[in-house]
Image: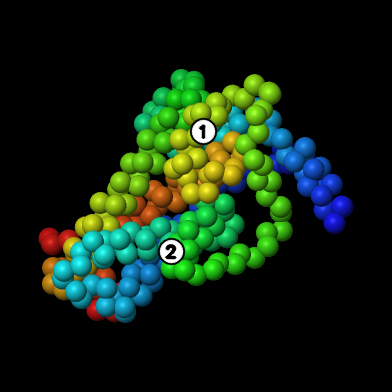
Amino acid sequence: MSSRRSSRLRQSGSSRISDDQIADLVTKLQHLIPELRRRRSDKVSASKVLQETCNYIRNLHREVNDLSDRLSELLASTDDNSAEAAIIRSLLNY
Amino acid sequence: MASANKPINTDVPEKDVFALHFLQSLSNLRRQNTFNSPEKTNDRVKKIKKVAYVSMARAAGGTNRLWSRALLRRAAKENNKVVRFPRRKKRVTCLRRRRSNRRDPVEEEEAERLRNLVPGGGGMEISKLMEETAHYIKCLSMQVKVMQCLVDGLAPK
């Protein structure tokens, strides 16, 4: 029991991440966000990256919502509008 | 344990893995006759949305990521189910956010908004939060692509 506790302490000490690693993660995030990818050459501040990351995530959530709406409409109808639609419906066991 | 120098991996599976999980889940919904009733639109949309997130979490590696574990746990709680995750080999240090004396390159208030957006973000240390965010973003955009493909395929030409 005590060994487990001391190993947790040891781990929390050694898992302190360096500033370099955080900067590296910030750069990684910067490359993932379309808004910021164009400015790869410029150094973008960490706070700007975080800000844009939040916006990007919110946009993605919104897209999931819209697409769920669309899918709900499309799946409720059973018209086969095209060959693709027929294939998809058969995949979904219609 | 030199965890400071380990390369951080944020790779995600290919798009077809996400597609497969999503189609399977949709097919399950179909089996439950979710699409038959024309009235209950909101219900239907909510179910599809939930299935989108859950299948994404499963496709992305289910229990290996904090965000996917949090998502699956949340979804199971909504169904009144108890989820048990296998014990991870590497212990995750979920520190309570400490008043850090060292100068952080990333401010805590800015990280707070991110914590609210990423599932399970509340208990993560900042570096872990950013790693999880990168993975989460990649998976979200994969899921969006898959859903867009389905919509395009089903839409009237």
Coloring scheme of the render?
rainbow
Q: Earlier in the sequence, mark 1 or mark 2?
A: 2
Determine the chain carrying the residue at label 2: B
Q: Does residue B5 appear to the left or right of A56 in the view shown?
A: right
In what quadrant of the picture does the N terminus of chain A appear?
A: bottom right
Label 1: few (<14), some (14–19) or many (≥20) C-alpha neighbours in 10 Å: many
For the point 81% across and 42% down, the residue is A10
Q: Does residue A76 appear to the left or right of B30 in the view shown?
A: left
State whether residue A4 is above or below residue B127: below
State whether residue A4 is above or below residue B23: above
Three-letter code for the amino acid on which mark 1 is drawn: Ala
Q: Secondary structure at mark 2?
A: helix
Percent position of residue B36, x then y: 20, 76
Percent position of residue A54, x then y: 41, 36
Q: Which residue is mark 2?
A: B78
Residue sticking out furthest to the right: A3
Percent position of residue B61, x then y: 54, 59
Q: Secondary structure at mark 1?
A: helix
For the point 59% across and 42% down, the residue is B124
Tell me, yes or no, if residue B151 can be seen here: no
In what quadrant of the picture does the C terminus of chain A appear?
A: bottom left
Which numbered mark, 1 or 2, is in the foreground of this view?
2
Q: Nearer the viewer, residue B75 or B153?
A: B75
For residue B34, which quarter of the picture? bottom left
C-beta proximity under 8 Å, tags 1 and 2 = no
Three-letter code for the amino acid on which mark 2 is drawn: Glu
Per the model, the C-alpha gap separating discs 1 and 2 is 27 Å
For residue B30, which quarter of the picture? bottom left
For the point 48% across and 63% down, the residue is B77
State whether residue A41 is above or below residue B124: above
Q: Which residue is mark 1?
A: B111
On whether disc 1 and disc 2 are found on a single subunit, the reply is yes
